[in-house]
Amino acid sequence: MNPLIAIGAAICMIACAGAGLGMGLATGRAAEAVARQPEASGKINSIFLLGLALTESTAIYGLLTALIILFVTGKPQ
Amino acid sequence: MAKQLIPLGLALALAVGGFVLRRLAARRLAESPAPSRWLKPGKRLAGLAGLGGAWWLVVTALSLVYSGAEHQGKKPPPEVMIFPKRVPLHLFGWNYDLSSSVLITWGIIAAVLVFALIFRFSVVPRMKDQPTGLQLLIETAVENLDHYIGTKLSGMSLSFGAYIFSTAILLVASALVELLGLRAPTADITMTLSLALITFFLINYCGFQRNGFIGRIRSLAGVSNAKLPPDMPLAQRLRTRLKNVAQPGTIGFPFRVISDLVVPLSLTCRLFGNMFGGMIIIDLLYWALDSKAIGIPSVVGLYFNIFHPLIQAFIFITLTLSYIEEAVGEE
């Protein structure tokens, strides 16, 4: 396999850093919100899960691109 | 042969010794009022050693039984296919070339249909006022779903409950098929794309139906959809409309249109990426563990094959409802 292909796949996975940062921020804020208003935890929970899903999708796009680079482009001929 | 029995004996000794030690430690913990500091971690360690010994025992025993089937040298990495296999079929004098995920989806639909029919003819005729067993389960599920949809969309809950529930069942069932060793149909981009397109048409259908053509454009442009009083003079009416349009938020119109058009793409890639990623991770785990893939994949699969699909089904439904809510707008 061309080493450049592996490097390209690795660069794709940088997307995970941003997604992790975003998810951490969201989780922290959700915990704060529940601590401030425990009775609203149900509503906060559903909003939190939704936001987490939207944030996670960036990491998923990165993973998908990396996998396609590795297994489709980098397939040994 | 005798040489191969040594690791087997060692593993057996480790497993039995670990569990016996754990038993002894547990008994001493229960008896003595003030146990020494090392007893509790020791018990845990002995339990872990016993578990590890049992695992090693099973692995060595199986590799003894299947010693001829083991790979010689380095195993090639697993073949990853973005699109599932094609299955050539010859039915009623016609040749078909179907994707394997279509066949698996038909199987899932048939299984769900059979379950629903059995449920319909065995449980539903004997419904009671005081629900028990399966009736209680299904009533709780429907009630919770209706309540959940009602918090998102008011006034449309009954017609949406059926579609949302069947989508959820299909998503969960097609993800759990992976436990049988088949490729999940949701790990195929065409399946997720078709589900996302249904959602896309549903969003726009609801938006146009509720607000009308002009109202939908207005809500996309961020212009107020409020009705003007009918006795307002024409000049003032025009002035109010113009004032509503001449807002800084109106500049966002093209971006809102684009983000609406991207919805099916993002839904597709999210579901497909999650399922496909989970599948590849499990495949790579089996490849890396090779003949030792006993017990460990089931622990990992608990997350990737059971928890993850459930969460993804929930997210797909929640996103569908949220987009519809956004399109319908606040009344």
Image: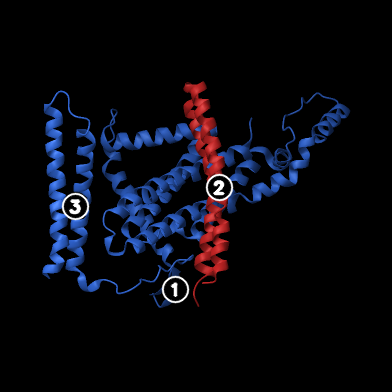
Chain colours: A red, B blue
> Please, what is the three-letter code of the amino acid marked with disc 1?
Tyr
Residue B54's label in the rendered image is: 3
Which is closer to the viewer, label 2 or label 1? 2
| Residue position marked by numbered label 2 in the rendering | A17
B14 versus B241 height, above or below:
below
- Of residue A54 and residue B256, the one placed in the foreground of this image is A54
Q: Mark 1 lies on which chain?
A: B
What's under tag 2, amino acid-wise?
Ala
**Could you tell whether B91 is left or right of B211 in the image?**
left
Residue bearing mark 1: B96
- Identity of the amino acid at label 3? Ala
Same chain for the residues at labels 3 and 2, yes or no? no
Q: Is residue B90 left or right of residue B263?
A: left
* Identity of the residue drawn at 18% across and 47% down: B50
Classify mark 3: helix, strand or loop. Answer: helix
Q: Are marks 3 and 1 in contact (CB under 8 Å)?
A: no
